[in-house]
Image (spheres, rainbow, N blue to C red):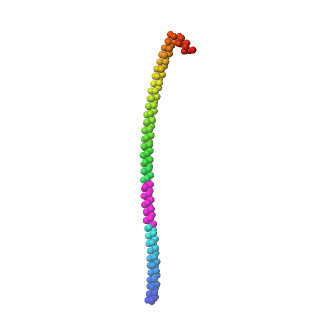
Amino acid sequence: MTNEELATQIKDLTVQVQDLAGAVKTLAETMNAKFEQVDKRFEQIDTQLSAIRTDHKNLTDTVKNMELRFEKRFETLEAGQASIRADIAGLRHDLFIEEGSRETADETILSDQDEKYKSLDKRLRLVEAKFPDLAQGSTA
């Protein structure tokens, strides 16, 4: 091969290398652009994930807060019910005592009235025995 042929081959190879270098450069630029798009998308995803984590934490805290408030109110309700039950038991006891004292009072009053009635009846019979005209007038 001659120098001219070698020079022509070198020029042809140089053109091919330059074309390949241009293609590689274009490919590298395209890849860089795609990588930038991917990076931007990952940044968006990271931002969204951060927002989701924040929302999740807020929701979890809200649910926990509600759970604790419900538990507190339920405990207060149970304590109130226990207090009411104790008050009702006390009232039942007081009613039982009151009922017993009223029965005793009623029996005392009835026996006292019965004694007075018998005493009055006895006196009336004595008066009627002394004055028979009174007894006949009241039956007629």
Q: Nearer the viewer, residue 15 or 115?
A: 115
Would residue 135 be found to the left or right of residue 79 on screen? right
91 w.r.t. 56: above or below? above
Q: Position of residue 105 (x, y in %)?
A: 45, 24
Q: Which residues are magenta?
A: 41-60
Give me the residue at 42% from left, 58% from top.
Answer: 54
Question: How far from the left and from the top, in percent, is residue 22?
Answer: 45, 79
Residue 66 in the image: state x and y as whole percent. 44, 50
Residue 137: x and y, percent?
Answer: 55, 13
Quarter of the image with the N terminus in it: bottom left
Q: Nearer the viewer, residue 52 or 73?
A: 73
User: Which residue: 43% across, 34% down?
Assistant: 90
Instruction: Depth check: give the residue in front, 36 or 139.
Output: 139
Seen in the picture, residue 61 relative to 26 is either above or below; the reply is above
Q: Main secondary structure of the magenta part?
A: helix
Give me the residue at 45% from left, 62% from top: 48
Residue 84 occupies quadrant: top left
* Tally of marks: 0
